Structure formats: C-alpha cells, structure tokens
Image: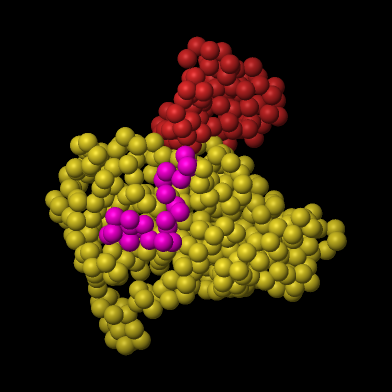
Amino acid sequence: MLSIPCPYCGPRDVTEFSYGGDGNVRPPTGPDAASEAAWSAYVYLRANPRGVHEELWQHSAGCRRWIRVTRNTLTHEMHGSAPARASAAAS
Amino acid sequence: MKYSLFSLARNALSHHERWPRAWRSPPPKQFYDVVIIGGGGHGLATAYYLARNHGITDVAVIEKGYIGGGNTGRNTTIIRSNYYLEPNAHFYEHSLKLWEGLSADLNYNVMFSQRGVVNLAHSYADLDNYSRRGNAMRLNGIDAELLTREEVSGMVPLLDCSSTARYPIMGGLLQRRGGTARHDAVAWGYARAADAGGVDIIEQCEVTGLRRDGNRIVSIETTRGVIRAKKIGLAVAGHSGHIAGMAGLRLPIETHVLQALVSEPVKPVLDTVVTSGAVHFYVSQSDKGELVLGGDLDMYNSYGQRSNLPPVEHAVQALLALFPSFSRLRMLRTWGGVMDMSMDGSPIIGKTPLDNLYLDCGWCYGGFKATPASGWCFAHTIANDQPHELNAAFTLDRYGLGKAIDEKGGGPYPWVH
C-alpha cells in the first residue's frame, strides 16, 4: 500500500486519496489565440514517464485539499509533496 | 515439425525427450525490412501476419524479456466482442472470428473455449443499457442474448441471486461465443508459426534508444547491438509512452498497473465467465481449476509490474458478495501488469508523425482478446503504409479531431476506462 505524505496531515494510506493525474499539464496561455493542436495536447497528451512523476492528488477522505506529489512510477518511491496551489504558483 | 496425433505418438516412443525447439533463437542481424518492438501476443501476431498475409519475411521481433512474459502472460484470458460502438464492434468481432480458427491456423492448441461471457445487470438501468448494447451487437451481426434473473441463476448456480443479495441480480447480457483461451499458448503458437514463416524472434533484447534523423527512425539501439530497419512497429503495451518518448513523441496514453489473482484449484464450479460492470469485477475458472479474478486498476500512474493490497481486497470483496460460497477458498497468488490506458478507452493502431514508425497501443484492459485482429490490422498497416478498414478509425490523431471512440463516455481520464 502506498503511503502518501499529505503536507497538511502527514503520511496517510493511498485509499484516503483520489488521483488527479499528471500535475504538469497546463491549459495553453492565451486560450483564444491558442491553436487546436495546443488545446489537444493539453487535453490528451501525457509525458507518462517511467520514473519521477509530478502528480495531483486530493486527500478526499481526509483534509480534502489538493496536493502535488512527486513520486517514482517504477519504484513507487515518494520524493515529497506540497500544497497544489503553492507549487502551481511557483512553477 | 507439424504437431499432430502422429507426432505425439512418435515422440511418446522417445519419452517426449526429442521434441525440437518450437522456434529458433537467432542472433540479431544488423538490418531488417521490418522490426517489431515487443514480443507479446500483439507483436508476434503482427510478425506472423506480415509473413502469412503480406509475404514480408525479413522481420525481427525484439523482446526485452522472454516471449509471453509481459501482459500476454498476466491477463485473465477473457475473449469477447460485446462492444457498442461500430469501430470496436467490427474490430473485436473480426478478432473473435480469428480466435475461432486460430488453433488450426497456427497448428498450436490455444485452448480456446467458448464458454460464454455473462455481464451481470444489477439494476433496471443496467438492463436497459445491456438491451441497448445487445441490440447494437445483433445489428452488427454479433451474438447477444439478454437473460432474465432465472436464466442467469440457471447458468451460474453459485451466484447469489436471492432477494437479499448485496448486489441484486436483475438479469444479464450473454455472449455465448465469448470465452477464454490459454494465454501462454497464444504467445508460443504465434511465435512458433512466425518463426516457421522466417521471422527472427530475438529475446533478452531491450531497446535502449531510438536514433531519429528528421522524420525517420534510422536505428534502434538495443542491449544486443544496433539494429536498422526500413519500418518499425511498436507493440509494447504499457511501455508505449516510454519507448515513444525515445523518439520524441508524447502519446495520449498513461501507464497504470492492473492486478489479477487466482485461488487454489478446485473442482469445476463455474463454467462461464462472469463479469459485473457495476461492481467492476470479473471471474472465471481456469482449466486447472483456479478461480481467476480481477477488478480495478490501482488508479495512479505506475510501471511497477507488481501487486498491491487495496485492489486485491476490492476484487475479493466483490467475489464474496456475488459468490458467498467461495468464502473458504484460499488465494494462491497475485500479480500485476502495466496497462497502456488510452484517453478514450479504445486502442490506437496506425501511423505516427514519423514516416517509418507505426504504433499499436492503448489496449487498456482488453488487449488479450484483440491479439489476432491487432496483429492482422497492424501487419496490414505496416505492409501497405495505410490502415486496414477495421483499424481506420483507431488513429493516433483522432483525439484532437473530436473523433474519440469512448465506449463508456468517460472522458479524457485514462484511469476511468
């Protein structure tokens, strides 16, 4: 069982969380001017790395906050977590 | 050597110690007309149909591990063609028809058993949905029968069809021509038949890089040296994103782990495949007597081909809710395989933005049953540089064009399909 380090609650079982997917997909800047290809890439294309992956989770059976977790998709090793909003603003 | 009653009798005389190898194990050549990356069922079937249907025999299948050691040997062996949407219905029905002649075609017993697949309806909404799907199937020439609760109970007597059942049984949708096959035999049968057609099957050969020059892949770097090819087909299931990334492509694919488990073997108790969409669970009994069951994904990106407790608990809870009498069975083993979950739950078989790279991926939960048709269509696509009519809709660029084939209407969240 994965243990996810919630920045608010500490390490908790994965069963308390809902998965939000790749944390590095962003809608195109300037949505009116963005090309269809840029929109399509945002909605459908994923890096899907075999290794370190930044992803969003919601602590849905806990504090209900969205968080950003850095995790290895091959070894499932956790590399840390942060509030989703703070790191989104920083990136 | 052709497998037959005579070859069996002849080898019995030598105590079965002189059977020849089923396929050669040649060292890789430096150049091939076609290299298929991935020695699972799909890659091997592609190589077989390239040789058989298109006369292309200068082909290598390169596999990082051993034949059938990936998802081909990890699935729950269910075969069906009970799809609603037209592209899926025609494609999977072609696959089912190929399954019906496969053992004879390959001269290898894949133990295809048309024991039927029952989808359980737990509500009136389920029944409405299944009658809609069954009618769509029948309009497409595919067999489907809507069952009442009494008919389901008659077919599957151990199922809890009582009025107090945790998941009430309201009826079901049956495809009698569906069933199971021996998954390893499918890999071995295609490998042997492809090898007999002149294909080189190269195991323990992992791709470490793809060298790209403009719009072409010029060479494949592997742990057994550099291989060049006119055309390259990618059939690596859960590793599609990883390998395509070596060519600089991003795919509408996420890789998720899916687990399955088997019980200790018992006498025959379940002679059909039982699935529940609402509970998200499926179970059948193998020829060895083990109950084979599975359910949900782990629901997060993973390349870890291993088991994890929460989905196993879910599958066992579902099993016991539906079949209370199995409560004393012990589970024998669990395992995981990594799925290429596409953004609409349907596969991708076709061309890529690169001129000589072709893609076969996005199989989600359903790759095993697709094996023959996937090989058939992928070989056609590679040989003719254009898709077969059966895979014309399964293009890589359909997502951006608003032509997603979303059987469930789940949207672009790969883990929900």
Q: How many marks?
A: 0
Q: Is residue A2 visible?
A: yes
Q: Quadrant of the N terminus of chain B?
A: bottom left
Above or below residue B250? Residue B47 is: below
- Locate residue B340, reporting x and y percent: 46, 46
Question: Residue at (37%, 64%) from the top-left corner?
Answer: B376
Q: Nearer the viewer, residue B232 or B165?
A: B232
Chain identifier, colour yellow: B
Q: Nearer the viewer, residue B71 or B266?
A: B71
**In the rendered view, would you say A69 is above or below B18?**
above
Of residue B83 and residue B196, the one placed in the foreground of this image is B83
Residue B12 lies, in percent from the top left, at 32, 84
Asked if residue B71 lies left or right of residue B193, the reply is right
Q: Looking at the rendering, which quadrant does residue B127 occupy? A: bottom right
The colour one sees for chain A in the rendered image is red
Left-right relation of A54 to B140: left
Drawn side of residue B244 relative to residue B224, left or right: right
Residue B377 image position (x, y, % from top left): 38, 61
Identity of the residue drawn at 66% across and 47% down: B314
Residue B28's x, y, as percent? 18, 54
Residue at image position (39%, 36%) is B250
Residue range in magenta is: B377-401
Q: How is the image coloured?
A: by chain
Please determine whether, in this image, residue B5 is positioned above or below residue B144. below
- The magenta stretch spans residue B262: no
Is B379 colored magenta in this rendering?
A: yes
Left or right, B398 with reference to B64? right
In the picture as drawn, the residue positioned furthest to the left comes out as: B30
**Residue at the image position 56 percent from the left and 54 percent from the top:** B261
Residue B239 visible in this rendered orientation of the protein: no
